[in-house]
Image (spheres, rainbow, N blue to C red):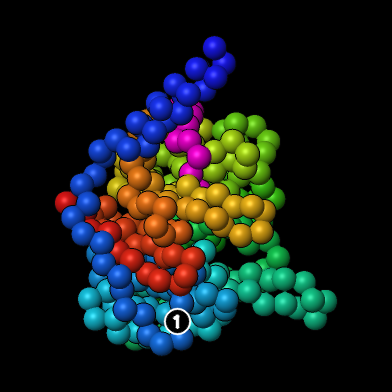
Amino acid sequence: MKKLFTALLAVAFALVANAQLVEPLSTQRVQLPNGVASEQATLSPDGSFAVVGVMGGSSLTRVDIATGESHLITSNGLASTVMISPDGQNIVFNSVSYNDQHLRLTALRSVNVATGREIELVKPSRRLNSGFALSNVGVTAIENGKARVRAFGSAKAQSLPVASINYGHLDITVNGKTTTLDPQGRGSYLWPSVSPDGTKVVYCLSGAGTFVCNIDGSNVRSLGYLHAARWMGNDMVVGMADYDNGEQILRSTIIVSDLNGTRQALTNDSQIAIFPSASADGKHIAYSTLAGELFIINLK
């Protein structure tokens, strides 16, 4: 009976994993410049370019999806932290340095796409939380539990809702006030982000899976085994279902999920597809492969 139940559960999961949530139209490989292998890429809101974190290094390169034309953004940026303002004009990321005591410091920086001008938004700090939020005029970051609102230019930036990680806790900042959310109690929380409409949070709880909840921590729903989930509009997320042997990833597929946990696989085991990112309208998804390739899935 136990074996029968396990088999039925596996069949049910397979059916859920292959539900038709989106309709793929095409998949294209993006031509990367010589010497650039993509470890993780973030797609611009309009899907016209991607910010590529170069494998084995800390440089970030902007790559035009249509032409493959590339421009170095910075030689010191963390690909896993890259965000792009809604208008596509400012690229924001964390950079790492070390002080005289060899302690790691994290700063928040931005680069303007049109001018290439790089500015320091938050100076190097020991207590800069993982996670920030962008508008067209500025960024809200969390340092030592306090909101740091910084503008890209002369226009005044407003405080935005931010989900961030603080020593494994999931913190939420609303109207400049930061509280510990931890929707499922104490644990190790990863990859949190607030939905574009500011009402929900997606996050991963180590050892338990990925979940979505309301911004106040209520109505927790499981999305199953999914890593590095990013929003596709307000009603779906895209992430990777990756499996490793403790040393390296053995297989990984790109998965789209709605907020009820219905899932659809967009890649198969012919590739080890990792770290997806979606355009603002959810019509384009970028992902990298373990071989350093960059692909775009175009959806109807």
The vertical placement of 21 against 70, above or below, is above
Q: Name the amino acid type tagged 1.
A: Val
Residue nearest the viewer, comparing 285 with 172? 285
Q: Does residue 73 appear left or right of residue 98 in this picture?
A: left
Report the number of discs. Answer: 1
Residue located beneath label 1 in the image: 36
List the single residue furthest toward the right.
Answer: 101
Q: Residue at x 67, y 53 (%)?
A: 246
Is 79 within the magenta?
A: no
Q: Residue at x 36, y 32 (%)?
A: 16
Q: Does residue 103 appear left or right of residue 82 in this picture?
A: right
Q: Does residue 65 appear left or right of residue 177 in this picture?
A: left
Query: Picture quarter containing residue 275?
Result: bottom left
Q: What stretch is highlighted in magenta?
A: 218-228
Examine the rendering and report whether any part of residue 255 can be seen: yes
The vertical placement of 120 against 12, above or below, is below
Q: Which residue is drawn at 41% across and 27% down?
A: 11
Q: Where is residue 181 in the image (x, y as percent from the top left)?
A: 58, 38
